[in-house]
């Protein structure tokens, strides 16, 4: 339900997001560089532990197991579109990248990011399976598989829950400024650990006073030719659209 602070509902496949990005193993791509692979229908992972067993006579009747390593795999299946969407890495780019790397004698490696409920899988991986299928009356699908290329990059991260904004205030709430001068005020978004603390600042009379944002500080400028009077600078948070008003009185 909207407004609930914690969502314990069941995870379904549409909520599992797989993104990829080109790069080298020594630098994790920025979030802005990551793109969904394509229109996905199935995503999964398999740690596939390799084990050895001990059945020595001091094991009290039970075979004991030791995990020696894991052949970690991320699998993906999606539907092929005639044209890739601009906000996706895309089937065309993906298939071409694989072919180009193999023809050049390089490994078809790629950064893979998969959000899976409360965790995120991150790793520099290599494409180890890539195939497509589609009957005359079926949607064409593409199946691929990623395995570890650089074990130092493999990470399983807990995904922090977003902290919503609950309000906003300004300090001070008003000031006077002469035409041709400026003043500032601070914007305080609550709570302090809110995930999205961005905001906008809009003047009710731009010819009398304008607002410029720098961090959590807003600078109010009164043009030299401004007329005397009052202007309201309205601050609005991007998350929740909470507002606060700073009143500036311009003197000439």
Image (cartoon, rainbow, N blue to C red):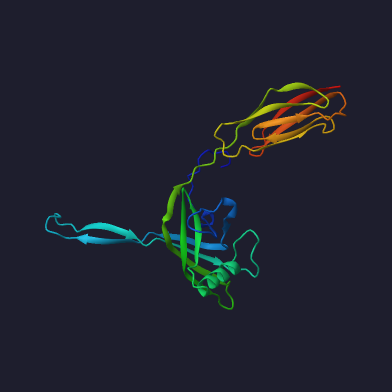
Q: Is residue 80 above or below residue 53?
A: below
Q: List x then y, in percent, for residue 61.
A: 14, 57
Residue that appears at 57% across and 58% down: 36
Q: Report how many numbered discs are placed on residues in the image.
A: 0
**Residue drawn 57% across and 72% down?**
140
Which residue reaches farthest left? 57
Q: Is residue 203 above or below residue 90?
A: above
Where is 212 relative to 27, above or below?
above
Residue 150 located left or right of residue 183? left
> Residue 174 placed where, x, y %?
73, 22
Query: Residue 66 appears in which quarter of the rendering?
Result: bottom left
Tell me the quarter of the image containing the C terminus: top right
Q: Residue at x 58, y 57 (%)?
A: 35
In the image, residue 3 lies at what x, y percent? 57, 38
Q: Quadrant of the N terminus?
A: top right
* Viewer-side residue, 50 vs 42: 50
> Is 110 above or below relative to 177?
below
Q: Quadrant of residue 199?
A: top right
Q: Nearer the viewer, residue 163 or 136?
A: 163
Give how far across and how far down residue 125 sits, in percent: 46, 61
């Amino acid at each position: 339900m909207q407004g609930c602070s914690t969502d314990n509902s069941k995870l379904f496949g549409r909520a599992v997001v797989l993104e990829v990005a080109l790069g080298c193993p020594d630098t994790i791509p920025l979030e802005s560089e990551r793109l969904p692979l394509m229109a996905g229908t199935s995503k999964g992972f398999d740690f596939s532990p390799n084990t050895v067993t001990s059945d020595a006579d001091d094991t009290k009747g039970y075979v004991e197991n030791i995990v020696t390593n894991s052949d970690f795999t991320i699998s993906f299946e999606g539907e092929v579109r005639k044209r890739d969407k601009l906000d996706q890495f895309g089937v065309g780019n993906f298939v071409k990248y694989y072919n180009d790397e193999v023809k050049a004698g390089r490994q078809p490696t790629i950064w893979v990011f998969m959000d899976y409920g409360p965790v995120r899988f991150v790793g520099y991986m290599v494409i180890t399976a890539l195939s497509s299928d589609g009957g005359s009356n079926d949607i064409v699908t593409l199946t691929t598989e990623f395995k570890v290329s650089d074990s130092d990059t493999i990470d399983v991260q807990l995904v922090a829950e977003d902290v919503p904004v609950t309000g906003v205030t300004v300090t001070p709430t008003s000031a006077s400024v002469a035409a041709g001068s400026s003043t500032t005020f601070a914007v305080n978004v609550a709570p302090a650990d809110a995930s999205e603390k961005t905001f906008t600042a809009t003047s009710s009379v731009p010819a009398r006073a304008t607002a410029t944002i720098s961090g959590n500080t807003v600078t109010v400028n009164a043009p030299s030719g401004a007329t005397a009077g009052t202007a309201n600078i309205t601050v609005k948070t991007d998350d929740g659209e909470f507002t606060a008003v700073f009143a500036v009185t311009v003197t000439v």
